[in-house]
Image (cartoon, helix red, strand yellow):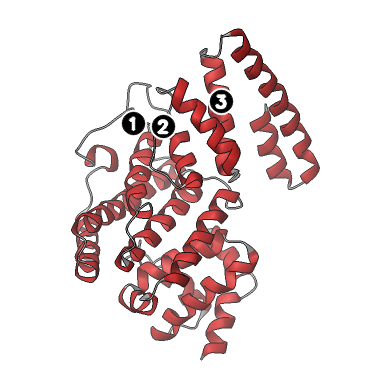
Amino acid sequence: MGSTSSHLAYKRQKDGDNVGYFYHRGQAITLVNKAIVDGTAATEGIIATVACFLQQDALAASAQATKSHHHGMCCQYYLTTARCDLTASIVLVQDPQLEPMLFNPDISVYFRQPSLYTWENAKALGIRLLNFTELHDLSDVAMNIYWGLRNLTEIVEGFKAGIEVVDRREEELQFSDRVEVLERATHTLWYSNSKDPQTTIFRLFGCATLIYIYTILRELPSELRMLKLVAMRMKDQMERAPNLNDILATFPELMLWLLFLAGSVAEAERKPFFARQASKILLMKKIEDQTNILKASQDFLWPERHSFEDEGMEDYFEDGSVTEHSATTS
């Protein structure tokens, strides 16, 4: 009920409607605490409730609450869905604690076989990353993520066009399983203890992919505080990168794609930063017309397409921020 109230408040865009969310969450907390005292906290209902708490806290970027509920989930409910664990890992900046429920070393089981065009583009990206960073393993991961991004996006488009079947039998592979595998692979890129500046491009690609997963593949609101947190981290990484201009020049299509994604979810005061970086690439490529700018932002993932359909990105241009920066810089 609390989750439903929160979703309704978002749809209505009225802060006052959140009262229902807090009321039902409070009632749920009371029931969970009582179950813990009574020693009956291992029921499916309580486990599902704690999982909801964890997911809500992580998406709201509430680190302390996320840490508390995540600890409880890992200690007592280890077999619960790993999706909440992945979301919590983003907020807490740590490795996922739970093992995936499904695993097959052949990722084509999850991503499906790539088309020749997808595979050639994925290989080209992997080779460019390897030549730039000399990091073989991460380059291979990035190549597979590109493959997954394209194929899973095509599945989503198939759902909307009525080509793909949404409701499959329980024993069959679900779309959420496919996305979980992609997100786990993405975690390898954005979460790294290495201080090597060459890992910056992987971190940025990983963070942008997270934003894409949650807004496009999972179709969650771009206003989520967790996504704003990810965008803030991207800005910090770029500001600290000594080789940022080299990255912009070497990977213009990739950087435009991730800059637009970050800008679409970032806090208002951080949007100009992403616009300025995007403008450097647009000037280098001599792109000024807004229609061509929008197309250029999609060239990384869909170089063969010439239409722009993502409404979320159009919001990034409502104030003309990128075109203004481009005109000013020129």
- SS at mark 3? helix
Horizontal and vertical percent position of residue 199: 32, 63
Horizontal and vertical percent position of residue 295: 44, 70
- The residue that disc 2 covers is 82
Q: Is residue 157 left or right of residue 275?
A: left
The amino acid sitting under disc 2 is Ala
Q: Nearer the viewer, residue 146 or 134?
A: 134
Q: Nearer the viewer, residue 273 or 160?
A: 273
- The residue that disc 3 covers is 50
Q: Is residue 298 left or right of residue 188?
A: right
Question: Image height check: is 318 above or below 310?
Answer: below
Characterize the local packing of mark 1: few (<14), some (14-19) or many (20 or more) Cα atoms within 10 angstroms. few
Quadrant in the rendering for residue 321: bottom right
- SS at mark 1? loop
Disc 2/disc 3 C-alpha distance (Å) = 13 Å
CB atoms at circles 1 and 2 under 8 Å apart?
yes
Horizontal and vertical percent position of residue 165: 39, 33
Q: Nearer the viewer, residue 174 or 15?
A: 15
- The residue that disc 1 covers is 99
Horizontal and vertical percent position of residue 20: 76, 32
The amino acid sitting under disc 1 is Glu
Characterize the local packing of mark 2: few (<14), some (14-19) or many (20 or more) Cα atoms within 10 angstroms. many
**Residue for point 37% across, 22% down:** 169
Disc 1/disc 3 C-alpha distance (Å) = 18 Å
